[in-house]
Image (cartoon, rainbow, N blue to C red):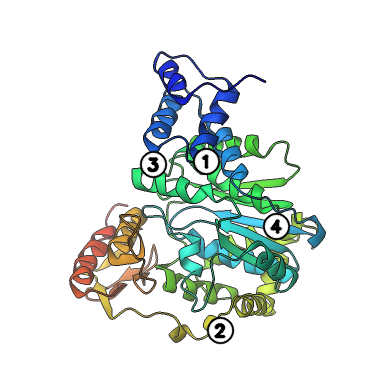
Amino acid sequence: MGVPSPPIEVLEALARGVLPSDADTRSFVARWCAGNVNDAQIIAFAGEMRRLDQHLPLSHAWASGLIASGQRLELASFGQTGDIHCIGIGRSVLAVSSILVAAAAGVKVCAVATRGLGFWGGLVDVVGALPGYTAQPSIPDIVALLEGCGVVITEATDQLVPAERQFSALYGQTGRYDLIDVVAASVMARSLAAGSAHVVIEITYGSHGVCRDLQHAEELEGCMHSIADGWARDVHIILRRYDIPITRMFGHALEIREIGELIRGGGLAGARECVADLSGCLIERSGFCDPGRGRATALQLIAQGDALRAAEDWVSSCGADPMVWTNPHMLPVATFGLPVLARDGGVVESVHLDRIGDVVRRLGAGKFYPAQMVDPAVGIELLAEIGSVVAVGEPIAMVHASDRALGDRAVTDVYDAIEIASPGANR
């Protein structure tokens, strides 16, 4: 095996259109993960690789570098193990709810998640709103949690895919966290390092999806499967169109409230169906129900209270109060609750979730720079569903803010993000 080329030689060759070998590609990324290639060089390298249509080898290099940066878990001794990933604004609610329902069926779930990027909410930020929750358990703690409550939701740690943190920071600060190679490598590296036998991934496409259209989603799906090849993992990917909101809470403590509603059998119908679909898929593929019975099993676990009990066991094991699922007053509460009132009567035609996400971030639930603190209490609560009829002056949303000036601006921005069509208008 030859000695990898120096990074500057690789960059100079790329500028002339000369592709690096697979060994040089993986070495370049591995050196960045180890701190021996700087951010400017890795951004230049990745940009040139994309320009030359080398997304697949780039994604493989990202994934292998992230996995190799830390230890890998092997969970075969725990029986049937699984993982669920959902990407995009509002999808953390669905991911956590689905994980808890699958755990209620007996699946041992180990999920390595991320914090928010741009207007996408981060699953780690959401579970971090649980009072007393620890987002970075050690590997012995992970083992103890899997043996006990059967659920682990952690972010990357010093032991487990540690380079994922610098990877997320890099693309979070460049605003290009939606690139195929970035999404595929991040999700698959975290899932493969976590060691679960069965992995269910939801890829959304459409106006609110992580992918702009079905073709883009299929390219991402193919990239993820390519990375997973050779790892002896059962990876199932669901492609889902995402043009209308199916959850109504956006903001970390608010999303915990909605998770509590869903695992108790409430919440919006679209969200319940999605949770049953995701958790049912993992339950079925893990062998905890007969083929074709996954959705029905998931819905039964919710109706019987098993999902709620699994959620209570999980938060208790993590040092939080299990009453948090049924008593929302235990969660952080914003100083101001400001209603967004309909200025005209009509039918709620659409909600621009990207704008909602931007507002939530400006309120303090997301970051504009790495050192910024995240406020778990703030967010947006949608009160009017798509297709519902609203009257003038009726509340269509609620802004939860810790700063009055930011809250007042958010009221205007949220109103502008919700389109109301006049009765009888051509739609």
Distance Cα–Cα, label 1 vs label 2: 39 Å
Distance Cα–Cα, label 3 vs label 2: 37 Å
- State the quadrant of the N terminus: top right
Instruction: Tell me which label, 4 or 3, sits earlier in the chain.
Output: 4
Instruction: Tell me which label, 3 or 2, sits earlier in the chain.
Output: 3
Residue beneath label 1, please?
34
Q: Residues within 10 Å of mark 4 (few under 14, many from 20)?
A: many
Distance Cα–Cα, label 1 vs label 4: 29 Å
Residue beneath label 2, please?
321
Q: Residues within 10 Å of mark 1 (few under 14, many from 20)?
A: some
Q: Is residue 395 left or right of residue 14?
A: left
Query: 427 or 71, which lies in front?
Result: 71
Instruction: Tell me which label, 1 or 2, sits earlier in the chain.
Output: 1
Residue 176 got which mark?
3
Q: What amino acid does circle 2 point to?
A: Asp
Q: Position of residue 228 (x, y in %)?
A: 67, 40
